[in-house]
């Protein structure tokens, strides 16, 4: 199956080439994608799948749009 992956802010350096068409095995989860990109799961603070908040163990489906955000600090 194929999904779209977008990494934001400090996670941009992990953005896969061809993020518009990221191949993933059927039954793959957000955690599978995060690990495959070389991101430590604890570095991902916010996850969106198709615009909705999702957990790391969320199973993905063909055509899903995945957004990964780090923790953001400010003052």
Image (cartoon, grey):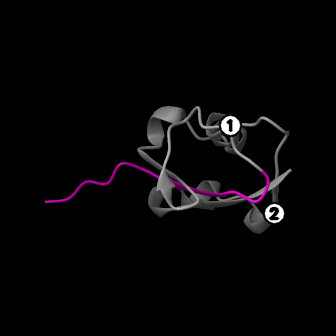
Q: Residue 21: which numbered mark, if any?
A: 2
- x, y percentage for residue 65? 65, 60
Q: Is the residue 42 above or below the residue 73 in the image? A: above
Q: Give the side of residue 10 with respect to residue 29, left or right.
A: left
Quadrant where the C terminus is found in the figure: bottom left
Percent position (x, y) of residue 31? 62, 35
Task: Tell me: residue 13, above or below residue 54.
Answer: below
Question: Would you call the spot at circle 1 few (<14 residues within 10 Å), some (14-19), or many (20 or more)?
Answer: some
* Frontmost residue, 41 versus 58: 58
Q: Nearer the viewer, mark 1 or mark 2?
A: 1
- Residue at image x 66%, y 40%? 38
The residue drawn where x is 67% and y is 38% is 59
**Residue 25 found in image quarter:** top right
Query: Which portion, as a residue range, is magenta?
Result: 62-75
**Residue 59 sits above or below residue 22 on the image:** above
Vertical order, 12 against 61 (above or below): below
Q: Which residue is mark 1?
A: 29
The quarter holding residue 5 reads bottom right
Q: Is residue 33 magenta-colored?
A: no
Q: Does residue 68 belong to the magenta stretch?
A: yes
Distance of label 1 from label 2 (alpha carbons): 16 Å
Mark before the other along the chain sequence, 1 or 2: 2
Q: Which picture quadrant has residue 20?
A: bottom right
Magenta: main secondary structure? loop
Question: Would residue 71 be found to the left or right of residue 41 on screen?
Answer: left
Where residue 46 sits: x, y (%)?
Answer: 43, 48
Q: Residue at x 58, y 60 (%)?
A: 50
Badge 2 local density, few (<14 within 10 Å), some, or many (20+)? Answer: some
């Amino acid at each position: 199956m194929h999904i779209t992956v977008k990494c934001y802010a400090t996670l941009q350096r992990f953005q896969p080439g061809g993020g518009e068409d990221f191949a993933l095995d059927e039954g793959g989860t957000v955690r599978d994608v995060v690990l495959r990109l070389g991101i430590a799961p604890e570095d991902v603070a916010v996850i969106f799948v198709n615009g909705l908040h999702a957990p790391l163990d969320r199973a993905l489906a063909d055509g899903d749009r995945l957004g990964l955000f780090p923790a953001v600090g400010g003052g």
